[in-house]
Every structure is written in C-alpha cells, then in structure tokens.
Image (spheres, helix red, strand yellow):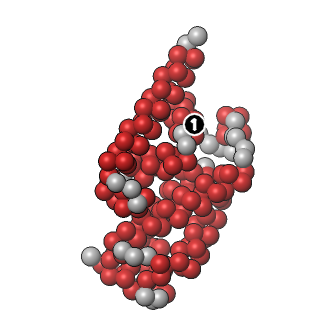
Amino acid sequence: MEEIETACSAIKGDEQAFLQLIKMHKEALYRTAFAFLKNEHDAVEAMQEVTFRAYQKIHTVKDPKYMKTWLIRIMMNYCQDQLKKRKRFISNEVLQEIGFHSNDTTLEIEEAIASLTNSEQKLIFLKYFQETKIKDIAELEKIPEGTVKSRLHKALKSLRNFLTEKGDADHV
C-alpha cells in the first residue's frame, strides 16, 4: 500500500517520493540492466539514464500500481536501444577476459534468448526473470492476456527448438 501512495505522490510531482520509488525498485532495475547489458559499468549508466527518463515522464503514469512494471519497461527499452547501437557480439574469449564466469548452459540459454525477437525477449524477461504476472504483462503491453500466453508459448517453443538443435549440433 505504501508503494502506491508513494507512486501517487511522485506522479503529482513530489521529488522525494520519486527518489523513494527509485530506491524501492533499484535492485530490480539494476538486475534488468545487468541481464541485458552484461556489465556493471553499463548497468550503472543505464540506471542513471532511466532515472532521468522516468523523472521526466512520471507525470504520464496512469495507474500507480504498475509503477515497477513501468520503470522496468523503460529500462528494457533503454537497454535494447543500447544493444542495437553496439551491434556487436561478445565471444566466449572476451567474456573470459573481462571476468565473466559462467557455465556452458548459461551461455547457451543466453544465446537462445538472443535468437528471439525483441518483443519475445521482453516477454520472456518479464515473465521469467522479473516474475511479472500475465495479467500485468497484458496491461503493460496493451494486448489481451490470451495474446500474451500464445506469444509466450511461441517464444518458449522457439527456445526449445534452438536448444534442441544446438544440442544436436554439439553431438555431431
């Protein structure tokens, strides 16, 4: 309840309430940025940029109960824009050089997710990484719940196919 009241105050222009909201959702925003951008420096930069963008547009939020989802959507859009600008792929050697310690399974899953369209990646991220409810995703994306379910099903099928093909290729 406190979060909704804080969100209402922030929407009305209360700067302290806005700062409190950012503080409340800082961890989720950072995790989102890091999941997309894969490094601390870029994630921190994304936090700063998204805080600024959210501050500029907070007055446009219609429903305070979706404040966290609104902030995460801004973060995801910002990160996807950054990734488009880069247009580069990080090889396994580069990941090891910068100290990214991961197992093969994680890299395969990341590769599989990267093979999806931006909208499919967004759905997977919201549903499985941020644990957003289908109803909330539907509201956020302004599409029916059934459409969210069918798109998630299609995205999961694509992931399954990608991983199955990759597994077959590894054993050839």
Q: Tell me: residue 59, above or below residue 121.
A: below
Q: Residues within 10 Å of mark 1 (few under 14, many from 20)?
A: some
Q: Nearer the viewer, residue 46 or 8?
A: 8
Q: Is residue 36 above or below residue 55?
A: above
Q: Is residue 103 visible?
A: no
Q: Residue furthest top?
A: 172
Residue 151 falls in image quadrant: top left
The residue at which mark 1 appears reads as 115
User: Which residue sits at x=60%, y=61%?
Assistant: 78
Q: Secondary structure at mark 1?
A: loop
Q: Decide if residue 60 is on the left or right side of residue 144.
A: right
| Quarter holding residue 149 | top left
Question: Which x, y percent locates residue 115?
Answer: 57, 37
Residue 93 percent across, percent down from the top left: 71, 34
In percent of width and height, residue 85 lies at 72, 54
Quarter holding the N terminus?
Answer: bottom left
Q: Residue at x 69, y 45 (%)?
A: 98
Q: Position of residue 91 (x, y in %)?
A: 70, 36
In this rendering, does residue 84 appear at all?
Answer: yes
Of the pair 129 and 61, the residue shown nearer to us: 61
At x 51%, y 49%, the residue is 119
Q: Quadrant of the C terminus?
A: top right
Total residue callouts: 1
* 96 lies above or below 64: above
Tag 1: amino acid: Ser
Residue drawn at x 53%, y 34% as measured from the top left = 112
